[in-house]
Image (cartoon, grey):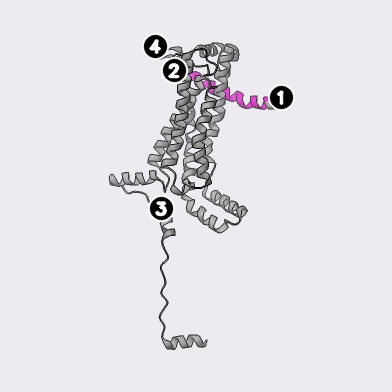
Amino acid sequence: MEIFGLIGSAIMTPLYYAVSAILLAWHWVFEQVPGLSNGWTWALSIIGLTVTIRALLIPLFVKQIKSSRNMQLLQPQMKELQKKYGHDRERLTQEQMKLWKETGTNPFASCLPLLAQMPIFFALFRTIDQAAKNGGAGAKGFLSEADAESLKAAMWLGGKISDTFMGAEHTETRIVAAVLVLAMCATQFLTQRQLMAKNMPADALNGPYAQQQKMLLYILPPVFAISGVIFPVGVLIYWTTTNLWTMGQQFYVIRNNPAPGTPAFKAKQQRDLAKGKGSAQDVIDASSASEAAPKPRTQPKKTSRSERKKGGGR
């Protein structure tokens, strides 16, 4: 067990320094603003940390969007593979992997921004949690004892930034924490709902994958609500801010670069036509139309009686 502790410490220690460095940089910036209380300085520093992290993750988000778009464009080819190798699961998987490799598509890229954020989230959680529990003795990374004590005592909107809903001594802290938990759950739900309602084709809304997405849509908010009551208010500020960033970033992408075959793509086509611009062709609809169109019936070629006799005598 001790070896796992050493491995965890080796992974997290650099993150403590990275998180605390960004946090302290923003804290110094907001300390220069006259009239800001200690609580607002730390709260805005956490928001600044969130914006910095999300800005650094934009390349991963772009990769996620490209991969998602490629997955939509590959739907016709994926259907052909399912028709051809549906009876052989192993061969189907091999052909799908081959197709993804040839087109440079990663079906798991949609998880990258979330996975990249989780270590940052835990580092921030531990930084605030240890400062709250141990004051100066719990300082992590570049935080000095004075910084940790300042963070522990910081009051924001009447609540302590370092306290949790369950462990709060003040009613104001519980109110602030409850509002942030509700905001965190609501933004998580609305972001996922926005994606499913506007940027997923009709075919993708049916089948096992769609059912899984719907389950996540309705299960994740209660999970966040239950776990949110043990998060410090500062961590709730971070998570709510990152959800708002995700929602706004996703809205921009869906509006300006929607996936083919989706309601958002049709809405963009209509906006482009209204502005007199040429609209891009919906390759998914074009592919579906070509599949649905019946093949023209070929009429038998007329031949004379003498030609038929010659043909029969061969």
Residue 8, magenta (yes or no): yes
Q: What secondary structure do most residues of the magenta stretch adopt?
A: helix
From mark 3 to mark 4, how far is it between C-alphas?
57 Å
Residue holding disc 3:
285
Give percent across and percent down for residue 187: 44, 30
Give percent across and percent down for residue 40: 44, 16
Judge the density around disc 1: few (<14), some (14-19), many (≥20) Cα neighbours within 10 Å.
Answer: few
> In percent of the image, x 50 and y 86: which residue is there?
312
From mark 1 to mark 4, how far is it between C-alphas?
48 Å
Contact check, label 2 and label 3, Cβ < 8 Å: no
**Badge 2 amino acid:** Val
* Earlier-in-chain disc, 1 versus 2: 1
- On the question of residue 149 being in view, the answer is yes
Judge the density around disc 2: few (<14), some (14-19), many (≥20) Cα neighbours within 10 Å.
Answer: few
Residue holding disc 2:
29
In the displayed structure, 301 sits above or below 104; it is below
Please tell me whether mark 1 or mark 3 is closer to you in this view: 3
**Badge 4 amino acid:** Gly
Residue segment shown in magenta = 5-26
* Earlier-in-chain disc, 1 versus 3: 1
From mark 1 to mark 3, how far is it between C-alphas?
57 Å
**Badge 1 amino acid:** Glu
Residue holding disc 1:
2
Residue holding disc 4:
35
Please tell me whether mark 3 or mark 4 is closer to you in this view: 3
* Earlier-in-chain disc, 3 versus 4: 4
Judge the density around disc 3: few (<14), some (14-19), many (≥20) Cα neighbours within 10 Å.
Answer: some
> Element at badge 2?
helix
From mark 2 to mark 4, how far is it between C-alphas?
13 Å
